[in-house]
Image (cartoon, helix red, strand yellow):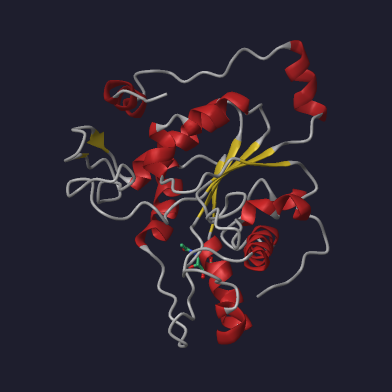
Amino acid sequence: MKFTVPSLVALALGAIQVTAAPASDNDNVNLVTRAPTVYFCGDSTMAAKGANDGATDGWGSYIGDLLTVSAVNKAIGGRSARSYWNEGRFQAVADLVKSGDIVVIEFGHNDGGSPTSNDNGRSDCPGSGTETCISDKTGETVYTFVFYVIQAAKLMTAKGATVILSSQTPNNQWETGVWSGAPSRFVGYQLTAKNALADSKVTFVDHHEAVSRMYRKLGNSAVNALYPNDHTHTSPAGAKYAAQAFVQAVYQNMNGTTSLSSYVKTPITTVY
Ligand SMILES: *[C@@H]1O[C@H](CO)[C@@H](O)[C@H](O)[C@H]1NC(C)=O
């Protein structure tokens, strides 16, 4: 399903109230007793089978083994915050979410580029607020990364979920043989979105920083061995490491307490 521009604008302005379905008696009981389900929204670096090349995998394939509650991996290769929104995928997750569930949102790898110059349907409008662009391909209004993430988080919190905005994983930081780890702008944008929401139900974890620390510790040859085909997608071993780094950051509250920290299997594997 595509969101029309007016509905997105109305959502942003709060003109349309997003309301959770009325809780049934059963839901009320569940509020007290039901273990949360954790949903993961992301791109190929999180998705099952990674880049679908037979050699790579996403960290969402391994995170369930590291938690005491059930994990549902909704990541899809090739998606950006914009395309995941436009395809109705955040809405589809929100439709599954029950009060008390947890939603992790991590994008950035496919969000670069320009929607006004040969738009690929994934690039966000530059900026970190309410800036808009017009796609040179479709004429659609394109919003910023921060804007799409904020709308997605609001969909989830309206259903009673808590949201963890996670920064994207780095590419291979040892690609040249010398460590180089500057984060993309989308790492900071996740924190910008969290701060703009100013809602205690929305927290931030710097997955990029956690993996960066792990990669520095692992070193040049060990990290290069985790990238079989390109500098973005890792082997299954690399995906498992990325899941462990995420769990360590969550467990140790790297960027503040999140709703997931009490659902981590202990003892954790320390990877950085
Ligand atoms: C997250 O916390 C770590 C540890 O304090 C810090 O190094 C990192 O810069 C923080 N991330 C952001 C985006 O502020």
Quadrant location of the C terminus in the rendered image: bottom right
Position of residue 89 measured from the top left corner of the image (x, y, whole percent)? 49, 33
Residue 157 in sight: no
| Image coordinates for residue 77, horizontal then vertical, percent | 49, 48
* Percent of width and height locating residue 259: 66, 45
Furthest residue in direction front, as rendered: 54
The quarter of the image holding the N terminus is: top left
Name the one closer to the observer, 218 or 155: 218
Residue 5: % across, % down: 28, 25
In the picture, measured across the screen, residue 158 lies left or right of residue 128, that is right
Between 271 and 251, which is closer to the camera in this rendering? 271
Q: Residue at x 52, y 63 (%)?
A: 233
Give me the residue at 43% from left, 80% from top.
Answer: 180
* 224 in relation to 134, above or below: below
Q: Is residue 188 above or below residue 17?
A: below
89 shown above or below 116 = above
The answer to which image quadrant residue 122 occupies is top left
Q: Residue at x 42, y 54 (%)?
A: 108
Taking the image as shown, residue 29 lies to the left or right of residue 135, namely right
227 up-or-down from 25: above or below? below
Which quarter of the figure has residue 112? bottom left
